[in-house]
Image: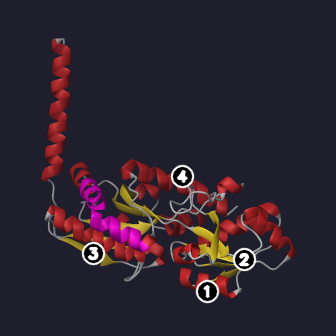
Amino acid sequence: MTIKTWLTGLATGLALTLATAAHADWEPRGPLTLQIGFGAGGSTDTIGRIVAKVMKDQTGWNVIAENKPGGGGIAMFTGIANRPADGQVIGLGVNMPILVNLVNRPDQLNFDLDSFDYLGTAARAQLALIARADAPFDDIAGLIDYARENNAPLAFDAKPQELAMRKVMADVGVEFQFLSTKGGAENTKLILGGQAIAGFEAGEHLDLLEAGELKMIASMNDSRHNYAPDTPTLPEQGFDIYVDPVFFFAAAAGTPDDARMALTQALENALASEDVATVVMNSLKSPIVNMGPEGTEQMMRDGVENVAQLFK
């Protein structure tokens, strides 16, 4: 080993040590607020509160979970984007409402993708298109053929679901009817009762799927579901669109490096805990998926392009 190589290695090691020390030394000045972009009682609230509790237990910080509902997370992220970038407040939201608004009405928002430092993700909701077990089709092609000859009402509870199927409808020249509901439980009720030929679910359907009362037509995500590895995605069935709801954390852009690193590590540690994994699985029927800062930012940027396709 040459002197030059040894000195280079020493300098690199020293830099890493100093960075680690700086990260370890940072802590919030007073309470750290984890804002949740939805009201109390839903899956986002449940996940946010267990993450805040575990972060508090693991770090000793005073972490407070606070609900900031409004516009599917728009109100919360507007506040975060326009507050001091000091690491004292982070937000937990779901990507799809944010992406839809960024594509559909960007001039009316007080933030854009560059307004945030992305910290990580908690999970991906596995969104399924389902039908009654005795429906006369087993995939998207069969659903389309059915809709050519029959009324085909679809039950949905979020705008991106409707937009995805309207895109399918436009691409193949078929007609669906759309039944707007308040949630997955109502979707299932309409499907089992015959008022809807198919609809969307993000976990509520699993017991009925196992019992043989429902069947899965497609994964609406960009990947197959862990509980249904043989059911293809919508893109795999010929349509280059997807609806991929992801629970993500972000802080105001420009958060100091030591604060951002400490927050990222604290979230990573909390998400790796058994307590958080259990709550996420119970809430979403999905495992923890933490994409990290870079992966989260890329997911948002790719998501804008995907959602733009839904509006074409």
Distance from label 1 to label 3 (Cα)?
Answer: 33 Å
Q: Which residues are magenta?
A: 264-283
Q: Disc 1 marks which residue?
A: 189
Distance from label 3 to label 4 (Cα)?
Answer: 29 Å
Q: Disc 2 marks which residue?
A: 134
Quarter of the rendering containing residue 282: bottom left
Say what amino acid the circle numbered 3 marks: Ala
Which residue occupies the foreground of this view, 113 or 229? Answer: 229
Residue 120 in percent (x, y) is at: 36, 56
Q: Disc 4 marks which residue?
A: 302
Identify the colour scheme used: secondary structure
Q: Nearer the N terminus, badge 2 or badge 1?
A: 2
What's the magenta bit mostly, secondary-structure-wise? helix
Residue 183 in view, yes or no? no
Give the vertical position of 180 relative to 210 (above or below).
below
Q: Disc 3 marks which residue?
A: 65
